[in-house]
């Protein structure tokens, strides 16, 4: 009985070896590729959510724990809001504009909505640590209302800007900021200059 050959001829054998080598090479390339490089940066993700803010922005996504770390002794510029709040768009834009002007390289963005709804322990600890800054609502409850810009230097709150959170009536941000944009920008610039030690 004749032994069966794996390959009918040398050409077929060479083709199979080349295919095998290509498969091994692809396996190595796919296995060693750093896919994080292909993920969108925080700046691009932020621009996708807040589209009036430039793609070249200074925003980094933060958790409640990140915010707590700043409040408990570090320094940072924090925007607290959520995409469903139309006023946060404008706060985000103006804060980024002033940060670029003053060369502040990072703004933490904390979307607190889910944490507030779930009474997350870290969120509640934030409330306890900044209770003097937070106004009490009509029900006598202290909660962060969107949007808020909090500027902290070595654990000390320099400014807590929440001017639009309790505006009464049906006012559109587009209309409101036609007259108040300059005031907000000046307030931000003054607070950030103090933060930088200018």
Image (spheres, rainbow, N blue to C red):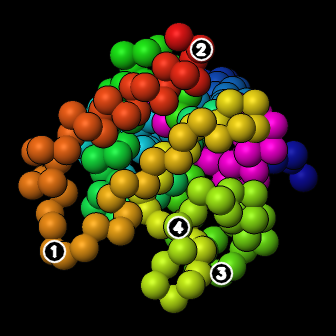
Q: Which residue occupies 81% across, 44% down?
A: 72
Q: Nearer the viewer, mark 1 or mark 3?
A: 1
Asked which secondary structure carries label 1, the reply is loop
Q: Which residue occupies 68% across, 30% down?
A: 153
Residue 37 left/right relative to 90: right
* Picture layout, residue 158 above or below residue 132: above
Q: CA distance from mark 2 to mark 4?
A: 28 Å
Q: Position of residue 11 (x, y in %)?
A: 60, 24
Q: Which residue is mark 2?
A: 197
Q: CA distance from mark 1 to mark 2?
A: 39 Å
Q: Earlier in the sequence, mark 1 or mark 2?
A: 1
Q: Nearer the viewer, mark 3 or mark 2?
A: 2
Q: Nearer the viewer, residue 160 or 96?
A: 160
Q: Residue furthest top?
A: 198
Q: Position of residue 156 (x, y in %)?
A: 71, 38
Q: Which residue is mark 4?
A: 135
* Picture layout, residue 31 above or below residue 113: above
Q: Residues within 10 Å of mark 3 (few under 14, many from 20)?
A: few
Q: CA distance from mark 4 to mark 3?
A: 20 Å
Q: Position of residue 58 (x, y in %)?
A: 47, 29
Q: Nearer the viewer, residue 126 or 163?
A: 163
Q: Which residue occupies 33% across, 59% down?
A: 164
Q: Which mark is residue 170?
A: 1
Q: Earlier in the sequence, mark 4 or mark 1?
A: 4
Q: Nearer the viewer, residue 99 or 181?
A: 181
Q: Which mark is residue 118?
A: 3
């Amino acid at each position: 009985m004749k032994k069966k050959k794996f390959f009918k001829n040398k050409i077929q054998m060479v083709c199979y070896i080349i295919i095998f080598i290509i498969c091994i090479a692809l396996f190595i390339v796919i296995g060693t590729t750093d896919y994080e490089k292909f993920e969108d940066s925080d700046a691009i993700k932020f621009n996708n959510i807040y589209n009036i803010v430039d793609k070249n922005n200074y925003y980094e996504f933060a958790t409640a724990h990140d915010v707590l770390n700043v409040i408990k002794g570090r320094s940072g510029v924090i925007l607290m809001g959520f995409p469903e709040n139309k006023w946060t768009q404008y706060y985000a834009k103006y804060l980024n504009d002033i940060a670029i002007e003053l060369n502040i390289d990072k703004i933490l963005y904390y979307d607190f909505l889910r944490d507030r709804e779930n009474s997350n322990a870290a969120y509640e600890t934030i409330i306890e640590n900044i209770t003097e800054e937070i106004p009490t609502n009509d029900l006598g409850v202290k909660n962060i209302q969107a949007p808020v810009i909090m500027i902290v230097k070595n654990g000390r709150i320099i400014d807590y800007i929440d001017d639009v959170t309790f505006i009464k009536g049906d006012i559109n941000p587009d209309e409101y900021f036609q007259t108040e944009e300059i005031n907000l920008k000046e307030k931000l610039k003054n607070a950030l200059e103090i933060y930088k030690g200018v």
